[in-house]
Image (cartoon, rainbow, N blue to C red):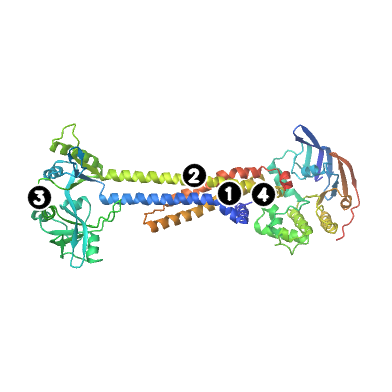
Amino acid sequence: MSPVQTLRVALRAILRNKLRAFLTTLGIVIGVGAVIAMMGIGAGAKARVEEAFAAMGTNVLIILPGSTSTSGVKGGFGSMPTLTWDDLAAVRNDVSTVKEAAPTMRSNMPVVSEEQNWTTSITGTSPEYFDIRNWPVALGAGISQSDVDAGTKVVVLGQTVVLKLYGPNANPVGQTVRVGTTPFSIVGVLAKKGQSATGQDYDDAAFMPFTTFAQKVQGGLGKYLSGQIMVAATSSDTTTRAQQDITALLRDRHHLGPGDDDDFSIRNLAEIAGAQQQGTETMTYLLASVAAVSLLVGGIGIMNIMLVSVTERTREIGIRMAVGAEPHHILLQFLIEALSLSVAGGLIGVAAGVGVATWLAGRFQWPVRIQTDVITVSVGFSALVGIVFGIYPARKASQLDPIDALRFE
Amino acid sequence: MVIELTDVIKVYQTGDVELRALDGVSLSVQEGEFVAVMGSSGSGKSTLMNIIGCLDRPTAGRYVLAGRDVSGMSRSERARIRNRVLGFVFQQFNLLARTSAVENVELPLEYGGVPARQRRRRATDALERVGLGKRLGHHPNQLSGGQQQRVAIARAIVNDPKVILADEPTGALDSRTSIDVLAVFQGLWRSGITVVLVTHEPDIAEFASRVVVMRDGKVLSDRAQEAKRAES
């Protein structure tokens, strides 16, 4: 009997009990569907972290000022300015692993155009900031060193701010906006940057020279840098090295003894992103392995129904043997039947999984990535389940005695 | 000789009880004979039938079928012998349910590896030979008992066997239909096929050319006779 014919016989047997076949495959359908959906969501989350990671830069460090420790109550990092402008200059000039460094001072303020107003995050910084963030200017110009030196009232807007104030596809370069109460001239618009890993919109921001920021927002430029320092290491490989170098430098500059805590902290974005990514991955594999267990349960369901089927069709097996079916014909017939059930379940599961993942993506704005290798592995695994759980019933059928089988009522 | 049994013994072991179903049977059947094997239940005629049909193996003795010693053959080898040399007809017809007449008849050809187009043609021919040329697409539950048994006969002859084995083929049929079915067997016999028919009814055995009577696992009598003609 040819394989095609054996397949036909198996399919016909399955189609005779459509409801039963469907219920039997349900375990596999749910298993494969869950694995595909989980892996899709996991891969999407991972991709989002990766994107955010790439958007931030793989070589970026952020230096935060230290905490106050008055009367034993620690105020948390950033609550007291411990970083000075000289520290910034030292980090920039004295650490060989540092490529660039820029101050970032931040405040939320309303930006008012002639028609609209929009409250956004205003950052006072230096021209290096945009190199560190790898964030080019789309229209007009960026903040220049002469702007910083002169403390000119210029502002560079993010895409979201432009959209809120001027509508889509507007070019506001050259126009005047008020930041708080002070009029500023728009010199440039930044390219679109997208979202951070936590869903924060990078483009909802405006930038001005830190000198201007200090005068107009903070009320004067003092000794301390009341903000953070953003640093770019020379490459992503030297980031950790740069972190150590800066720590040593700042401890020395702040005269901290061996037993003293740091009065600043350095965040390594690569480390944070890596940890987040690992967390996502662990979660994905955990959920997927739970889903894989239901594949196993599905396999047991198939074995159960195949055993029932062999018993029900004992007489048919006897007839087939009497007219010349060899044991391996019968074995193959039932094995292919089990395999068809499990593979059909697998394919329906793929469709269901992709459907659920797509629905979740649309409904909750989750990033979902369906990977073809996950589909291949799932279908392959369900085929394996069919073979593993189908072999025992099929062997049982093939070992039947034809005389007993023919007499079976 | 198409069938040659020499001192065949079959013992069934059930726990401590030993049942000698066949106790030294020697039987030779020539090509073109119509043999009726008679005997009451427990006489060993069914066991003899199973051994002749290569469904079972003798415990001792020698069985040569169509020139080949089958007594020591494996399951697969016996399956191939059943497929090529033998045709079976059973009391309960044993057709596959929800499967059309022509597909039932094709079944032995499928295991014999006959190509699809040839299968359909040969199955159709076989059904025409038993007078069911117009019932090809009918399922067993749409056919009468006599018609079902004819489908079974068509299935038995479709692979041009040397021997047809019929186990109480009229047991589930009324007397009128029984004669019809016997007429089909006689037709096959006249065309040269060897027929071995097991029955416990003497008036069915009358239609054979030779009657073998079994009792207690032994051949009690074995005689040739003028076969009564089945007029349908």
- Residue identified by numbered label 2: A293
- Residue A333 percent across, percent down from the top left: 62, 49
Few, some or many C-alpha atoms within 10 Å of disc 1 (few <14, some 14-19, many ≥20)?
A: many
In the picture shown, does residue A252 fall above or below A394? Answer: above
Few, some or many C-alpha atoms within 10 Å of disc 4 (few <14, some 14-19, many ≥20)?
A: few
Marks 4 and 3, Cα distance to the nearest angstrom? 90 Å
Q: Report the chain holding disc 2.
A: A
Image point (66%, 59%), residue name: B117
Q: Is residue A329 visible?
A: no
- Residue identified by numbered label 4: A312
Q: Amino acid at mark 3?
A: Leu
Q: Earlier in the sequence, mark 4 or mark 2?
A: 2
- Residue identified by numbered label 1: A338
Q: Amino acid at mark 4?
A: Glu
Specify whether disc 2 shares its chain with disc 1.
Answer: yes
Image point (67%, 46%), residue name: A326
